Image (tube, rainbow, N blue to C red):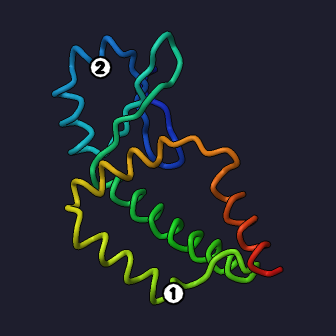
Amino acid sequence: MTDKEHTMGHKVVKRLPMPEVKAHLERLVHEVATMGTPIVIQTRGEDQAVIISLRDFSTIWSAEETVSASVRHRVRAALRAADLLSEPTAQEVEAVQAFDATHSPADQKRMLARWRQLKLSPALSEIILRNRERERE
């Protein structure tokens, strides 16, 4: 093991400065893909990013998706229990279907990007909670 290689659990990890990575990127990618040795890229001696094999990435990503799905399920259950989330009404489902029928996926994506940039005051969640309070009165 060279001074640029470190053990991480049972795996060897290489740490290389950015200029060396740039100079030998093709060889390093081949090495990561075939040997599975992650390469930590450093700038000014600080770890900044890592190159990992597609196999390792797929393992990490699928595990992350599973965890995320589980977390999403628990969050939704908690929101339903607190009466902060409910199933859409027939009228809401109809409105969504009408929207989908009249706007292409590309248009929907552009609209969503614009909507995400909106700065609402008060926040949308606060508006929803206030409306629910009024409905209960």
Whether 132 is drawn above or below 34: the answer is below
Residue at 21% x, 54% y: name it: 106
Q: Quadrant of the N terminus?
A: top left
Which residue carries the number 1 mark?
89
**Where does the image place residue 41, in percent across and percent down from the top left?**
40, 24
Q: State the quadrant of the C terminus.
A: bottom right
Q: Amino acid at mark 2?
A: Val
Residue 83 drawn at (x, y percent)? 72, 80
Label 1 sits on a secondary structure element that is loop
Q: Do the residues under discs 2 and 1 have CB atoms within 8 angstroms?
A: no
Q: Is residue 129 above or below residue 33?
A: below
- Checking the image for residue 18, the label placed there is none
Give amino acid for label 1: Thr
Question: In the rendered structure, which disc, 2 or 1, sits on the residue that comes first in sequence?
Answer: 2
Q: In the image, residue 100 lies at what x, y percent?
A: 27, 71
Residue, disc 2: 21
Horizontal side, residue 84 vs residue 13: left or right: right
Which residue does the image show at 37% across and 83% down from the upper left? Answer: 94
Question: In the rendered image of this protein, does residue 70 appear above or below residue 128?
Answer: below
> Is 31 or 97 nearer to us in this picture?
97
112 sits to left or right of 110:
right
Q: What residue is at 46 percent from the left and 80 percent from the top? A: 92
Residue drawn where x is 16% and y is 27% of the image: 26
